[in-house]
Image (cartoon, grey):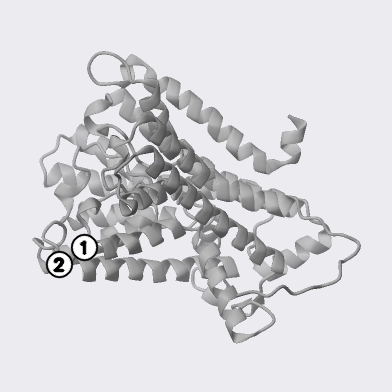
Amino acid sequence: MRRTLQHPARIVPLAFLAVIAIGTILLMLPVSRRGTGNASFMTAWFTATSAITTSGMTTVDTATYWSNFGHVMLAVLTQIGGYGIATMATLLGLLVSQRLGLRGRLMARAETSSGLALGEIRTVLTLAAVVMFASELVITVIVAGRLWLTYDEPLGSALWEGAFNSIQAFNNSGFSLRSDGLFSFVDDWWICVPLVLGVIIGGLGVPVLYELVRELRKPAAWSTHTRLTVWGSVVLLVVGFVTVLAFEWANPDTLGPLGVTEKILASFVQGTIPRSGGFNTVDYGAMDTDTTTIVTGLMFIGGGSASTAGGIKVTTFFLLAYVIWTEVRGERDVVVGRRRIAEATQRQATTVALLGVATVAGGTLALLALTKGVPLDRALVEVTSAFSTAGITVGLTPELPVSGQMVMIALMFIGRVGPIAVASALALNTRHRQYRYPEERPIVG
C-alpha cells in the first residue's frame, strides 16, 4: 500500500478497477434487469465499464434491457466516474507539483499561472461538485419541464428522464432511457441545447473552470493551459459544426429531410458530441465517409484535461501543433501566449499522443482480426469511440463476439485512465542526471 501511495499514478487505475467490479456485481443482480433472469457477466461487465469510464457504449438496448433499478445504477456509476475522473486528475496534478522542490514549484507557478496549490485541494473538490450538481440541476429543470409541458410526460417520469440525461450530458456519457436515443428530439432546441452545453462545460476540466470562475473577465490573465483548452475547444466546435453541416446537408439519411434551422441544430449537436458526449440525434452509421473521418479525428482529440471527456485532450493536440509550427519556422523555443513551454512538457505531450495512436491502431487491428468481414472504417470509428470514451457507434458494438467486446472494454479503460496515468507517471518519474552524454543528430525525415 505504501508503494502505491508513493506512486499516485497507480491509484487511479486501481480505484477504477475496484468500482467497475462493484458495478458489475450490482448490474448482475436480478433486480437490475427488466423481466426475468439476470444479466450475463459479460453484459454487466461491459456496461459497468462503459458507465464508469463515462463512455455510454452498450451491447444491449439500455431502455428495454435494464430495469428502473438498473437505470439508477447506471446514473450512479456515471456520476462516480465523472466526478472521480475530474477530481482525481486534478489531485494527481497537485501531487506531482508537491514532489517538486520550492524552486521548481515557484517556476511552475510562474509559467502556468494556474493558481492551483496543495492548500486549495478542498476548494478544487468543492468547485468540481458545485459546478457538476448546479449544471445538472439546471439541465434537469429545463429538460424535464420541456418533456412535461410539451410532450405530456408525467411529471415524475419527466423529472427522472431529465435528471438521467443531465448526468449523462455533464459527465460526457451517452446512455439513454429511450431506444432511439435523442432521434425524436432532433428539432427540439429546448432539449438539445441544454444537453450539449452540459457536454461542453463538463468537457472543459476542473482547472479551467476554476480559473474561469476567478478570471472570467480577464482573458489576458488566463494560464496557458486555460487558453489552449478554451480557444482550442472553440476551434474544434466550429470545425465539427461546419463539417457536419456541409457534408451532411443533402444526405437523405441524416440532415437531408430537415429544414434549415433543424439542420443547423442537428449539426451543432453532432459536431459537438464527438468531443466525448455520446448523444446522437441522427444516425452516425448513415453519415458519409468524409464526415465520419472528421468525426473520428475529433473523437481522438477529445476534451479538456482533468475533465469528464476522453481522448488525448485538447491541450495535448494544440501543444503539438505549436511544436510543429515552431520546428517548421526554425525557432528555438515553443512559445504559447508569451510563455515558453518546457521541453519535458513537449515530450509528455508527444508520448501521450503517440501512445494514443498506437492504442487505436492496435485496437483496430485486433477488432479486424476477431471480426471477419468488418469494414476498416467502421472498425476505426468504433475503436476510436471506445478509446476516447465518446460513446458514438455505427452499430458495430452490439454485433461483436465476446472477444471483440473484451477488446472494447480494454480500450474504454485505457482511454479513460491511460492518458492521465501515463502523463502523471512521466512527471513523477522525472530524473535529472548529474552528467550529459555527447550530443549526436541522427537524420530525421
Q: Are marks 2 and 1 in contact (CB under 8 Å)?
A: yes
Picture coordinates of residue 261, whole percent (x, y)? 15, 67
Residue nearest the observer in this picture, 60 or 275:
60
For label 1, the SS is helix
Q: Is residue 195 above or below residue 114?
A: above
Name the residue: 54% across, 64% down.
Answer: 315
Residue 166, image x and y in percent? 33, 45
Horizontal relation, residue 64 to residue 433: left or right: left
Q: Residues within 10 Å of mark 1 (few under 14, many from 20)?
A: many
Q: Considering only vertical position in the picture, is 362 above or below 75?
A: below
Can residue 4 be seen at all in this image of the molecule? yes
Q: Quadrant of the C terminus?
A: bottom right
Q: Is residue 119 something that shows in the picture? A: no
On screen, residue 52 above or below 442: above
Q: Position of residue 230 (x, y in %)?
A: 47, 67
Q: Position of residue 183 (x, y in %)?
A: 17, 48
Q: Residue at the location (17% across, 64% down)? A: 263
Residue 261's label in the rendered image is 2
Residue 196 as seen in the image, left or right of residue 283: right
Residue receiving disc 1: 265
Query: For the residue marked with disc 1, what is the amino acid?
Result: Leu
Judge left or right: residue 28 versus residue 99: left
Q: What residue is shown at x 32% (from left), y 16% (from top)?
A: 38
Q: Secondary structure at mark 2?
A: helix
Question: Could you tell me how far apart the alpha carbons at marks 2 and 1 are, in whole angstroms?
Answer: 6 Å
